[in-house]
Image (cartoon, coloured by chain):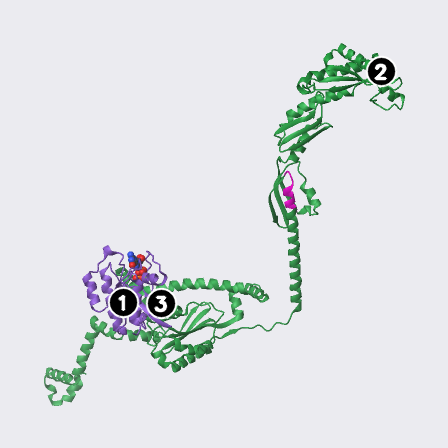
Amino acid sequence: MLHKKICMLGSFSVGKTSLILRFVQSIFSDRYLTTVGVKIDKKVISVDGQDVTLMLWDLYGEDEYQKIRMSYLRGASGYLLVADGTRIATLEKTLAIKEEAEKNFGPTPFVVALNKCDLAEDWEITPEREAELAGRAWKVVRTSAKTGEGVEFAFRSLIKAMLPT
Amino acid sequence: MSDKPANDVGGPSAGGSSHEDEKALQELRTLLFSEEQHEIVALRERIESPEQRARDVSAVVAEAIQMRRARGGDHELSAALTPTVEEAVRESVRKDSHVLVEALFPVMGPAIRRSVAEVFRSTVESFNQVLESTFSIRGLQWRFEAIRIGRPYAEVALLRSLVYRVEQVFLIHLKTSLVLQHVVDPAVVTQDADMVSSMLSAIRDFVRDSFSTQQGDSLDSLQMGQLQVWIEQGPQAIIAAVIRGQAPQELRLSLKEKLEEAHRRFSRELEEFDGNPAPFEAFRPELAACLTASYRRDKPAKSRPYLAVCAIVFAVLLAGWYGYTAIQNHKWALFVENLRQQPGIVVTSFQRARGRYRIQGLRDPLAVDPEALLDQRKLNPRLAEFHWSAFYALDDSLVLQRAIALLQPPAGVTLSVQNGVLHAAGDSSSEWKKSMRERAHFIAGITAVDDKDLNDENSPRRLKAAVESEIILFELGQAEINPRQQPNLAAVAQTIQKLLQIAPSAVGNAIVELVGHADSSGPEATNVLLSQERANNAVRELVRLGIPEASLRATGIGLSSPLRPETDEQNRQYNRSVTFRVVGPETPQNR
Ligand SMILES: Nc1nc2c(ncn2[C@@H]2O[C@H](COP(=O)(O)OP(=O)(O)OP(=O)(O)O)[C@@H](O)[C@H]2O)c(=O)[nH]1
Ligand SMILES: [Mg+2]
């Protein structure tokens, strides 16, 4: 069976931990417990008839006190770049992290998750901006760890992008 | 440089002006020493200018501190620097605390979590150890030893037996932190190997990044109480062994060899690893060979049969004791069951405590004595502890006992109780009957009295019997009433009077038949006449005593139904008589 390492990247409190919790255990909690250091989860998933063991590295979110430690990203087969759709600034931060990761480790498959899409009235990302991202031939998925919308799809898309075709 | 010798040397020109000399000398000086003079000026300037001095010291301050340290003057240096450093930290926090927070944050969280986990783990571990060896003889020895030397028991136990054991070995791909192969001692409960390996790598990354060490340094062991993780790193993979106890250094060597072998055999696979660990299955036996362990063995103990014998005797005694207690318990339970069946006893609790049986409940004072029951069942009364509260039971049998005790029924009266109803039957005086009726209702448990079968002297049946038991005797051949029989007649008359008084209600219109008898001395014809005459006379006498004639009837039956066989004179006398029979009630049908 294939084993793959995936890193969750993004600003703090965008929902990285929540997305993993939703994806692995199908649960959601309103409580915010910030991640300290790294938390690793595991999930076996079947894509195109092939079982893959995912090692999901949930990193602490970048904030003004600490930048993401690049060494944690070493050997990752893919990144889930998470932004909080209700805070436009988190999208810019996430893209900056992506740039830095590519500088260190070269191009790596990724999927952009615009999370918290259940909070439609607070949504700050304009359709134009979204179209512009998609226009770069990027995979951009709206997700909600709360309702589960798009979560499975985002991870599956990432795995497809990672596996050799 | 004095002037005199110069003059001497000058000779002829000595008489010239000394000013000239002075000038020439100056010139010479300048020629000879100008460079040095400049230097001296510069030096002076340098020493006197603080700015310049600072510049100079700054160039060598680091080297100076290093030299000082090398000389071993550490303490004074630290002492000198400490106040300044402290002040600097304080100042930094005051100005912008974020700087320090940022610097310390990465090490604080993991440190706290690790120490919590360590406390928890060691608690569980020592508990396990204790459980494992508590019951062995060796365990006891260790316990004594632990007390003697004042160390925790778990520590002694572990020290005494296990030297070390390699519990798990991981082969981990360096770049991706994914597990290539994992072997585990069957006796060990493990976490998910994938997770452990990833976490291990994360920790190593963290340590390397957090404590900037020299290039190429890496975390090569972790210690948590009795557990250690030894890590060896190669260019493509790392090998990590989880070890309990104190392993010898040779083990590290063999880990290194295994790692080198893995790199040799799988260099291509390691280079091109894409997440598929299948090729490394072949390396399993090599890793498994690292799962070694070493136990400290005590010298094989001399066989000690007396220990076994003692153990067996002890076991038999124990079994015997348990059996005996079980049987006793059963007997007592039966006893209590029997107690519960007894009228007037309610058992509310039954417990065994400290070898005695404690029975609590309610007991009617009239109920059976529990001590007597104990005797019957051959149970030791000294083991019993009765706690009775008195109460009135409503069981019929106890209510009856209570009634008998209170009412004291005379001979001839029988009492019984059924569902709270007191039945009285037999003959009694009317006073007793009356008092019984009054008092019965005050007896606990009696709800009603039924005395229709209880006859006092005025009851029709008793009166009838009284009348019928009377007899009037006559002289031989005579029909006249003997004056000596008068009191008898008077008594009969009184009884008949009473009978007739209650008759309308109780017996209807009673008729009293007077039956005349004669003995066998005369001829039968005269006998009938004689007996009829006797009955007639008695009727007449009763009428005279106030009995209405309509209630009397006279019959003479001669010798046809003798009262007694005429065997002697006394019996013969009985047959010369009048007797009484109450017939009636004269109901319309009878008429
Ligand atoms: N409404 C809504 N809330 C979400 C969603 N995802 C996460 N949250 C909430 O956002 C908060 C932060 O979520 P986390 O998953 O802890 O965020 P994180 O990115 O792991 O944060 P750090 O570990 O601090 O970097 C929590 O209170 C979550 O309940 C979502 O899809 N919808
Ligand atoms: Mg988190």
Amino acid on which the number 3 mark rests in the picture? Ile
Amino acid on which the number 1 mark rests in the picture? Val
Colour in which chain A is drawn = purple
What chain is the green one?
B
Q: Earlier along the polypeptide chain: callout 3 or callout 1?
A: 3
The picture quadrant where one finds residue B27 is: bottom left
Q: Is residue B258 visible?
A: yes
Q: Residue furthest top?
A: B544
Frontmost of labels 3 and 2 is 2
Residue B442 is a magenta residue? no
Quadrant (top left, top right, bottom left, bottom right) of the N terminus of chain B: bottom left
Q: Which residue is mark 3?
A: A45
The kind of secondary structure the magenta stretch mainly shows is helix
Residue closer to the observer: B578 or A115 = B578
Residue closer to the observer: B293 or B496 = B496
Q: CA distance from mark 2 to mark 1?
A: 146 Å
Chain name for mark 1: A
Q: Is residue B540 above or below residue B386?
A: above
Amino acid on which the number 2 mark rests in the picture? Phe
Which numbered dot is residue B474? Answer: 2
Assess mark 1: CB under 8 A from ligand 1?
Answer: no
Secondary structure, mark 2, is: loop
- Count neighbours of disc 2 (C-alpha within 10 A) and say few if under 14, some if 14 to 19, many if 20 or more: many
**Measuring 17% from the left and 80% from the top, which residue is drawn there?**
B37
Assess mark 2: CB under 8 A from ligand 1?
Answer: no
Frontmost of labels 2 and 1 is 2
The picture quadrant where one finds residue B8 is: bottom left
Q: Which residues are magenta?
A: B335-344
Q: CA distance from mark 3 to mark 1?
A: 17 Å
Q: Which residue is mark 1?
A: A111
Q: CA distance from mark 3 to mark 2?
A: 134 Å
**Measuring 24% from the left and 60% from the top, which residue is drawn there?**
A85
